[in-house]
């Protein structure tokens, strides 16, 4: 009897279809039974692991429950858990989405609760079965650091030690280890049930590969000298394609995907590795960004990691091809834009000025010695947000003002939550981070200081000394910062609520109207 390793995960959902992803222990046919109909797909194999994504099509109503069979044997739902249901995208569009980022997969015992806090996503999975329908999100957006390949949990480290003694001892090395990393992250019963019944959209950030991934060209040059790094980046991008990216695509998009067709024809480990190697070496060969129409709103998920142009003196958050794609997506018809950027676009103004200044010095504004020390400073304290790619920040700022409609930018990464509003246009930066990986007390106080006017003045002064022009508009943090583990919801058209957890219960931190 085939066993279910991971899933089912409800991924892409629109008004007439839903896609369900699974990993099985051996090759088989995966059958989803829903409302008296059966939908099937054979698994495909990558490096000895077996996957399927099953499309439920021509749907006309929500599905109250579904089951999963592997070669005819029922493996889902789990005993004692609520049924997994499917709510289609409403005809009048998205009502509510939830989002967050940065979730470590450490145990839930008392010792780890002291160091890492409660797992808000796990608590959310406990909360929803008893919640009213209006509390349910139509979509869960996960904005990066879904797994920590460079800082594995004790269970993952034990798995690594059991199979090899080679470097890197404290980090993920290959596809098999990535598969186990994702399994540990997503198979707690509460998490597994949540992901089986709430559609998800995902994008990576650095820790899905490694801290500071693609911070700069010097960073890439340094990592190229590390013997195990090439194998790691190939495994990381390949695993991301399987575990996260594939489910971001609509059934029509997947039907046209040449890599998926190759994988369906046989064991596709070599094909996936070749794809991942090229995606890293030539970012323009693949697009990780994607967009979805959600009724009156348009969701644009932006790759702010792999698509970077790292040319010293002309650094860009998005290379020319990716920028042209983003311009097209922003111009498409929609009443409001929801942009998913794993890293914040609008930081506190003082931090923004420091990152502008650092970029200029890394480009040689104050000479060679300052350039070298500034690069060390950049990598040491993660100066790699939109502000550190000033030309891209200014281009996007002007584009979003010009669009003349509400723009909600959802972000994570910084390990605290806040709301910022631009002084021009209807542009809101909504940050929710972490789901479970809190800052130390020292870093909390450091980030509190960035909210004060003196920090803004210092950052602005440094930017002016380096000859940096003023940004196209000003902005301010209007709510926050909050340092609790959190998940946030956006209830359209204009309400944002951040939630924390205490044990298995969730409670609001704050709620704001975007006006």
Image: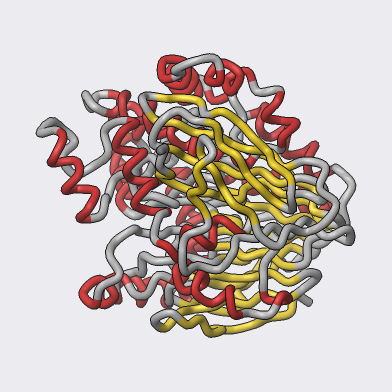
Q: Is residue 362 above or below residue 354?
A: above
Front residue of this view, candidates 8 and 121: 8
Residue 494 image-quadrant placement: bottom right
Q: Is residue 347 above or below residue 216?
A: below
Q: Is there any visible trace of residue 96 in the rendered image?
A: yes
Q: Residue at x 13, y 41 (%)?
A: 161
Q: Residue at x 48, y 67 (%)?
A: 121
Judge left or right: residue 292 versus residue 167: right
In this view, the residue farthest toward the left is 165
Front residue of this view, candidates 39 and 140: 39
Q: Is there any visible trace of residue 404 in the rendered image?
A: no
Q: Is residue 497 above or below residue 174?
A: below
Q: Position of residue 47 (x, y in %)?
A: 37, 24
| Colour mode of the rendering | secondary structure
Q: Position of residue 54 (x, y in %)?
A: 63, 38
Front residue of this view, candidates 395 and 212: 212
Residue 181 image-quadrant placement: top left
Judge left or right: residue 59 versus residue 356: right
Give the mark count: 0
Q: Residue at x 63, y 79 (%)?
A: 131
Q: Position of residue 200 (x, y in %)?
A: 60, 53
Quadrant that contains the C terminus: bottom right
Q: Position of residue 12 (x, y in %)?
A: 67, 46
Q: Residue at x 34, y 74 (%)?
A: 117
Quadrant that contains the N terminus: top left
């Amino acid at each position: 009897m085939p066993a279910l390793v991971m899933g089912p995960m409800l991924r892409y959902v629109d008004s007439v279809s839903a896609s369900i992803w699974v990993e099985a222990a051996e090759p088989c046919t995966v059958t989803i039974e829903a409302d008296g109909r059966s939908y099937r797909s054979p698994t495909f194999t990558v490096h000895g692991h077996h996957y399927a994504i099953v499309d439920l099509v021509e749907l006309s109503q929500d599905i109250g429950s579904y089951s999963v069979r592997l070669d005819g044997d029922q493996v889902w739902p789990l005993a004692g858990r609520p049924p997994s249901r499917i709510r289609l995208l409403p005809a009048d569009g998205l009502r509510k989405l939830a989002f967050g980022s940065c979730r470590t997969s450490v145990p839930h015992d008392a010792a780890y609760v002291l160091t890492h806090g409660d797992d808000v996503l796990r608590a959310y999975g406990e909360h929803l079965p008893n919640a009213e329908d209006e509390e349910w999100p139509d979509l869960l957006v996960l904005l990066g650091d879904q797994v920590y390949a460079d800082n594995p949990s004790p269970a993952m480290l034990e798995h690594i030690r059991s199979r090899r003694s080679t470097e890197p001892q404290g980090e993920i090395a290959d596809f098999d280890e990535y598969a186990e990393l994702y399994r540990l992250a997503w198979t707690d019963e509460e998490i597994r049930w949540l992901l089986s019944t709430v559609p998800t959209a995902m994008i990576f950030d650095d820790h899905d590969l490694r801290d500071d991934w693609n911070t700069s060209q010097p960073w890439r040059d340094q990592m190229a000298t590390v013997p195990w790094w090439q194998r790691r980046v190939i495994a990381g991008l390949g695993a991301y394609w399987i575990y996260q990216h594939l489910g971001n695509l609509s059934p029509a998009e997947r039907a046209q995907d040449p890599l998926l067709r190759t994988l369906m024809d046989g064991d596709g480990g070599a094909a996936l590795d070749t794809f991942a190697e090229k995606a890293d070496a030539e970012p323009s060969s693949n697009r990780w960004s994607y967009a979805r129409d959600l009724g009156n709103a348009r969701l644009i998920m932006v790759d702010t990691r792999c698509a970077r142009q790292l040319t010293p003196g002309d650094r860009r958050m998005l290379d020319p091809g990716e920028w042209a794609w983003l311009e097209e997506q922003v111009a498409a018809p929609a009443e409001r834009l929801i942009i998913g950027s794993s890293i914040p676009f609008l930081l506190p103004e003082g931090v923004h000025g420091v990152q502008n200044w650092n970029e200029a010095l890394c480009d040689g504004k104050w000479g060679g010695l300052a350039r070298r020390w500034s690069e060390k400073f950049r990598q040491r304290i993660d100066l790699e947000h939109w502000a550190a790619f000033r030309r891209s920040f200014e281009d996007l700022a002007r584009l979003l003002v010009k669009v003349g409609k509400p723009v909600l930018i959802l972000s994570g990464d910084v390990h605290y939550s806040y709301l910022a509003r631009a002084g021009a246009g209807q542009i809101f930066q909504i940050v929710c981070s972490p789901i479970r990986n809190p800052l130390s007390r020292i870093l909390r106080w450091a980030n509190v200081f960035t909210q004060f006017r003196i920090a803004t003045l210092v950052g602005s002064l440094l930017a002016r000394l380096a000859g940096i022009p003023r940004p196209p508009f000003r902005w301010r943090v209007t709510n926050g910062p909050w340092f609790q583990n959190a998940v946030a919801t956006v209830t359209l058209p204009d309400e944002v609520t951040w939630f924390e957890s205490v044990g298995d219960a969730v409670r609001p931190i704050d709620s704001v109207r975007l006006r």
